[in-house]
Image: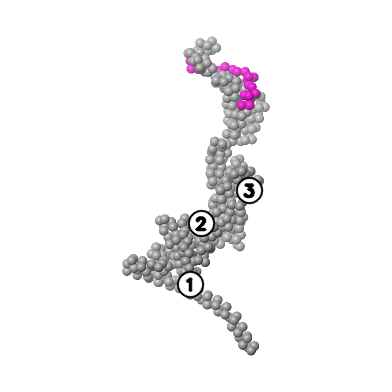
């Protein structure tokens, strides 16, 4: 071994960002193991390298004992024999016996190379793990390096390579080698094969990150994202609210002619993103989450987190969505199991009345007002009021009258619009009749 070899090790340590001292220590261990395994099996070997000259010193270690055990002749030496070599030696001390480095064979050299390579890999893996162990939960930009037969995608993050399984990929997105993309780091673990970095493109956190990048109101906290339900590559629902009464959260997220939300979806394979108005009352939140469908009465079981929603027959397919996607995302968004009940009697006016009653009940007594209004939609409403007692029935009747007064204006507006439409349709026929009469 010469000085050039030590210089090469120093260069390797610098290129791989490894500790030079640790690399030299690993090399000494590798040389000791190779010599002990191939040249002097059973003996205790130590190797020391001179970092200045590159010279290698190999010694056999033997322990001084009174009487050498038969099976320990290679690692022990008797006191009598040791005193002949050194008159100051004592029992329990260790003696070193030099070995000619020329005895190093080709097999020993090959073994040393393998051990050194393994040590370098282990050191690199430890460094990569230390670098990425605190990056879980972050968004990183990487480059697709390769794919395998199981359709796993491997992403080069710089010093480390991450894996993106099929379930964490965006549906329908094609990943080509050299493609740059943003990924969400889900977890970082240290396995026997090295650090394991799991990334995702399907995580809701990626959608939230992109909205913060493209929407200033979300970035500064004016608009707050309350919940996200996502089916990557197909459709997502995002519940937002505004901390400033002068800022419309939905309009801020969509942007002028949809410019902001389109910039977000462009990164997500044109995934459809619905912006929903968040509400602190479960009924209104569920109603908003089921949009664009218009729904009627909503019965809640807060303990079981179940909701029974009455929907008009013309709105049922819209509420369910393609392959049940709309109601499924609404359930994920609100945390309630939603059961849709079709009804021929539910109209747009019913939905408007129910929404008005919900807003009134939120300002007063939620449960009592809702139960009073729900009596309008249930066949057993009168019987339930009678069972509740005369006082409660009277209170419920008063609240129903108040709710009816509030929605009466809505009903009048609907009727007025309908009459206006009817008159506008009849007007052309009247003009034609007058024209024919004048001609005759």
Q: Give the camera-side residue of 166 and 161.
A: 166
Provide the residue designation for mark 3: 175
Q: Give the camera-side residue of 430 and 61.
A: 430
Percent across and percent down for residue 277 are: 51, 61
Provide the residue designation for mark 1: 410
Left or right: 6, with 168 as reference point: right
Percent across and percent down for residue 19 are: 59, 32
Please tell me whether residue 272 belongs to the stretch shown in magenta.
no
Label 3 residue SS = loop
Q: CA distance from mark 3 to mark 1?
A: 53 Å
Residue at (48% x, 68% y) in the render: 344
Closer to the eye: label 2 or 1: 2
Task: Answer above or below: position of 147 versus 389.
Answer: above
Provide the residue designation for mark 2: 328
- Give whichever of discs 2 and 1 has the lower sequence position: 2
- Give whichever of discs 3 and 1 has the lower sequence position: 3
Span colored in magenta: 91-111
């Amino acid at each position: 071994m010469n000085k050039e070899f030590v210089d090469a090790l120093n260069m390797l340590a610098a290129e791989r960002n490894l500790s030079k001292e640790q690399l030299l220590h690993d090399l000494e261990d590798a040389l000791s193991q190779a010599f002990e395994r191939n040249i002097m099996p059973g003996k205790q070997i130590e190797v020391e390298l001179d970092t200045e000259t590159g010279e290698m010193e190999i010694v056999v270690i033997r322990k001084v004992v009174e009487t050498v055990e038969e099976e320990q002749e290679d690692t022990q030496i008797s006191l009598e024999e040791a005193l002949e070599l050194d008159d100051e030696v004592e029992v329990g001390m260790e003696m070193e016996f030099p070995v000619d480095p020329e005895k190093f064979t080709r097999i020993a050299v090959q073994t040393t190379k393998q051990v050194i390579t393994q040590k370098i890999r282990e050191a690199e893996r430890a460094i990569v793990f230390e670098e990425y162990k605190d990056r879980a939960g972050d968004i990183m930009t990487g480059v697709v390096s390769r794919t395998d037969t199981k359709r796993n995608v491997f992403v080069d993050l710089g010093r480390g390579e991450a894996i993106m399984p099929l379930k964490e990929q965006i549906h329908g997105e094609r990943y080509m080698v050299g493609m740059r993309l943003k990924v969400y780091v889900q977890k970082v673990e240290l396995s026997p094969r090295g650090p394991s970095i799991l990334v995702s493109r399907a995580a809701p956190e990626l959608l939230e990150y992109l909205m913060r990048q493209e929407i200033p109101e979300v970035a500064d906290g004016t608009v707050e994202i309350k919940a996200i339900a996502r089916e990557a590559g197909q459709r997502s629902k995002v519940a937002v609210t505004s901390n400033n009464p002068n800022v419309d959260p939905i309009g801020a997220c969509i942007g002028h002619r949809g410019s902001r939300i389109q910039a977000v979806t462009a990164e997500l394979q044109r995934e459809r993103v619905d912006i929903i108005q968040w509400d602190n009352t479960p009924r209104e939140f569920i109603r908003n989450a089921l949009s664009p469908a218009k729904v009627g009465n909503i019965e809640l079981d807060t303990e079981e987190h179940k909701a029974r929603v009455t929907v008009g027959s013309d709105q049922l397919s819209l509420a369910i969505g393609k392959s049940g996607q709309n109601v499924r995302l609404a359930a994920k968004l609100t945390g309630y199991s939603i059961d849709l009940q079709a009804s021929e009697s539910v109209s747009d006016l019913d939905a408007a009345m129910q929404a008005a009653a919900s807003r009134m009940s939120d300002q007063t007594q939620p449960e009592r007002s809702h139960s009073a209004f729900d009596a309008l939609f249930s066949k057993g409403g009168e019987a339930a009021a009678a069972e509740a007692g005369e006082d409660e029935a009277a209170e419920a009747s008063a609240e129903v009258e108040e709710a009816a007064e509030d929605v009466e204006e809505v009903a009048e507006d609907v009727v007025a619009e309908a009459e206006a439409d009817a008159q506008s349709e009849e007007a052309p026929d009247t003009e034609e009749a007058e024209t024919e009469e004048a001609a005759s």
